[in-house]
Image (spheres, rainbow, N blue to C red):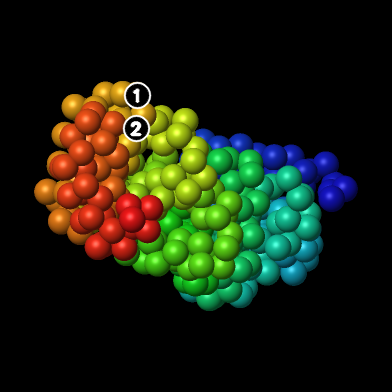
């Protein structure tokens, strides 16, 4: 600020006193200058010293004064913005962190903190944008990934929220029933690619999402993507949740039986189909595919019985 040398020396001394924890002496040194209440740097440093003393009301007052004298003190905006968060003055905090980014767009931590204020101000889309901007620079911050998940959830974007909860380790936040309903909705709209993209990400992060694996296998079976099915079916079965519906687990066992049959492991296939039917007596796919294996091994009468059962359950191919 082009101060006289005598004042500049006292301010340098005040700064050094802050560094060694002598806050009262620092403020006294500033007050000895001829510009203690009119120079932005002097007022700002008194705010820093007061903050370290735990005198937060005084610190906030000094930051207000400093910024009134010079609105381009980045750290004063940042500190004031945090105080405003503590006071739940969300819009004021947003304004200060917006100023931080105006002064230095590379201060990417400001996106993280401003995003929190946006969230509490119920401006969820802005919070999502800020959290995403921050995560572009620090993709491993699980706390902010989870915070973005809460913003997505509050904004009604359940699938994206679930991805963030899964990727941040907050599995307890997942609503499996809601997830399946959301994914079914995407499939009903005909967007198989998007549904499969979500399923791939979710099952990778949460192997216990058994319903998701069952839905994924239905898509892959329709696409005849046996390579992907073979690569994932064992993981799907071994990570089954205890509370998953017998119907979903039965379906996965039937898929495992099909893969075994394709490798001519007929005994293994029959065992899996038997298990599938034990879990779900109305598993038409298991009856159909067990009937095929029985036909292939010359057990025609048992095969016909299975195919009739599959047909009665609505399996058109069985007829």
Taking the image as shown, residue 180 lies to the left or right of residue 34, namely left
Residue found at the far top of this picture? 264
Residue 60, by quadrant, is bottom right
Q: CA distance from mark 2 to mark 1?
A: 7 Å
Q: Position of residue 314 (x, y in %)?
A: 31, 63
Q: Is residue 140 above or below residue 78?
A: above
Q: Is residue 261 above or below residue 53?
A: above
Q: Residue 125 or 17: which is nearer the viewer?
A: 125
Q: How many marks?
A: 2
Q: Residue at x 45, y 61 (%)?
A: 183
Q: Secondary structure at mark 1?
A: loop
Label at residue 313: none
Q: Residue at x 74, y 40 (%)?
A: 9
Q: Position of residue 300 (x, y in %)?
A: 20, 38
Q: Secondary structure at mark 2?
A: helix
Q: Residue at x 36, y 47 (%)?
A: 213
Q: Position of residue 233 (x, y in %)?
A: 34, 36
Q: Residue at x 58, y 40 (%)?
A: 138
Taking the image as shown, residue 304 lies to the left or right of residue 56, namely left
Q: Residue 258 or 167: which is nearer the viewer?
A: 258
Residue found at the far right of this picture? 2
Q: Is residue 146 above or below residue 240?
A: below
- Quadrant for the C terminus, please: bottom left
Residue picked out by circle 1? 263
Residue picked out by circle 2? 259
- Contact (CB < 8 A) between labels 2 and 1? yes
- Visible residue check, residue 167: no
Q: Position of residue 116 (x, y in %)?
A: 52, 62
């Amino acid at each position: 600020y082009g101060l006289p040398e005598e004042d500049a020396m006292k301010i340098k001394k005040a700064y050094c006193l802050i560094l060694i924890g002598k806050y009262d002496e620092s403020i006294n040194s500033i007050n000895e200058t001829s510009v203690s209440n009119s120079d932005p740097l002097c007022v700002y440093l008194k705010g820093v010293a007061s903050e370290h003393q735990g005198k937060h009301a005084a610190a906030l007052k000094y930051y207000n004064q400093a910024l009134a004298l010079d609105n381009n003190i980045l750290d004063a905006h940042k500190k004031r913005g945090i105080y405003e968060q503590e006071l739940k003055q969300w819009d004021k905090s947003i304004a200060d962190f917006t100023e931080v980014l105006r002064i230095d767009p590379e201060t990417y931590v400001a996106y993280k903190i401003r995003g929190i204020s946006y969230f509490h101000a119920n401006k969820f889309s802005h919070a999502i944008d800020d959290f995403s901007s921050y995560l572009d620079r620090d993709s491993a911050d699980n706390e902010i990934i989870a915070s973005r998940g809460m913003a997505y959830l509050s904004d009604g974007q359940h699938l994206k929220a679930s991805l963030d909860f899964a990727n941040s380790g907050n599995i307890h936040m997942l609503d499996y029933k809601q997830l399946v309903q959301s994914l079914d909705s995407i499939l009903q709209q005909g967007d198989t690619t998007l549904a499969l993209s979500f399923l791939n990400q979710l099952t990778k992060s949460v192997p216990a999402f058994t319903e998701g694996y069952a839905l994924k296998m239905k898509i892959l079976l329709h696409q005849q993507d046996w390579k992907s099915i073979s690569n994932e079916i064992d993981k799907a079965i071994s990570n089954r949740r205890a509370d998953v519906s017998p119907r979903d687990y039965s379906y996965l066992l039937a898929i495992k039986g099909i893969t075994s049959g394709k490798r001519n492991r007929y005994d293994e296939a029959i065992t899996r189909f038997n298990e599938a039917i034990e879990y779900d007596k109305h598993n038409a796919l298991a009856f159909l595919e067990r009937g095929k294996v029985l036909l292939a091994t010359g057990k025609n009468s048992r095969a016909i019985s299975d195919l009739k059962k599959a047909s009665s359950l609505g399996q058109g191919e069985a007829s």
